[in-house]
Amino acid sequence: MSLAFDLYWSMRSPYCYIALDRVLEIRRRYDVEVKLRVIYPIAIRDPGFFARVPKHYRPYHLLDAQRAADFQGLPYRRPVPDPIVQDIETQVIAAEQPYIRRLTRLTAAAAEAGKGLDFLDKVMRLLWDGRTDGWDKGTHLADAIDAAGLDSEALMRDVAVHPETYDLIVEANQKAQLKAGHPGVPLFVFEGEPFFGQDHIDVLVWRMTQKGLTART
């Protein structure tokens, strides 16, 4: 019998991008279902978060994300533009957030279509691998969605016409994530047990192996 785990994900998280290849490898290698559950970044869920953290929080976060990407041998650069509209000096999060809301709704729509991981495979790289300035301009995003095996025009139209449908899905994911036991991403939840962070992927596989995880044939 196939196993399954929930994967809580943010499109703005560098650590999600750093985990991406290993998540895809789990899907490729093992008989396990990965249930993608996208959520909004902490900047949207808690706009005051960055105003409360110590001054060393952001510098360390930037350093550590680059280091973790280098350790994994990944091309890496923060997205241009940042999916979150934020004043870096004051840490104030803008009221209007056109990038991250659209990205998150599109991810939810892709997951509903059964193509969530394929979407991540193309769109997260577009954002994070450093090869594309202005990922939001031209056909960059549409091309990535099409490359994931989805109809970008239909997906974008659906999200634009029915944003509330996908907001409800994301809201339900966020509530389920908190119930699972941790607010961070990437978060893997297997049989009710949470595993937080890209550095816990091997522990997740170890636990699933204890429960009968088998290789795909």
Image: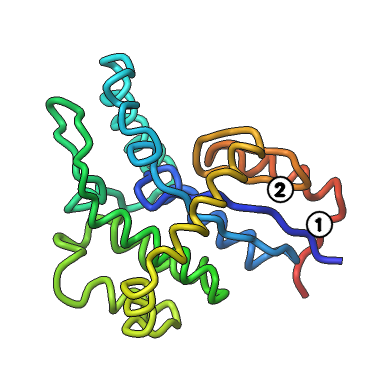
Amino acid of disc 2: Val
Q: Indicate left or right for 90 with 212 as reference.
A: left
Q: Please say if 200 is above or below 5.
A: above
The residue located at (73%, 63%) in the rendering is 32
Mark 2 nearby-residue class (10 Å; few <14, some 14–19, many ≥20) = some
Mark 2 vs 1: CB contact within 8 A: yes
Instruction: Locate the N terminus by quadrant.
Output: bottom right
Q: Nearer the viewer, residue 153 or 140?
A: 153
User: Label 2, label 1: how many angstroms apart (C-alpha)?
Assistant: 8 Å
Check disc 1 and report its element: helix, strand or loop: loop
The residue located at (62%, 45%) in the rendering is 176
Q: Residue 35 falls in which quadrant of the image?
A: bottom right
Q: Please say if 166 is above or below 45.
A: below
Instruction: Give the residue pinned by disc 1.
Output: 213
| Dot 2 or dot 1, earlier in sequence | 2
Instruction: Locate the C terminus by quadrant.
Output: bottom right
Please tell me the numbered disc located at residue 205: 2
Q: Position of residue 100 (x, y in %)?
A: 30, 54
Q: Residue 157 falls in which quadrant of the image?
A: bottom left
Check disc 2 and report its element: helix, strand or loop: helix
Q: Position of residue 162 (x, y in %)?
A: 39, 72
Amino acid of disc 1: Leu
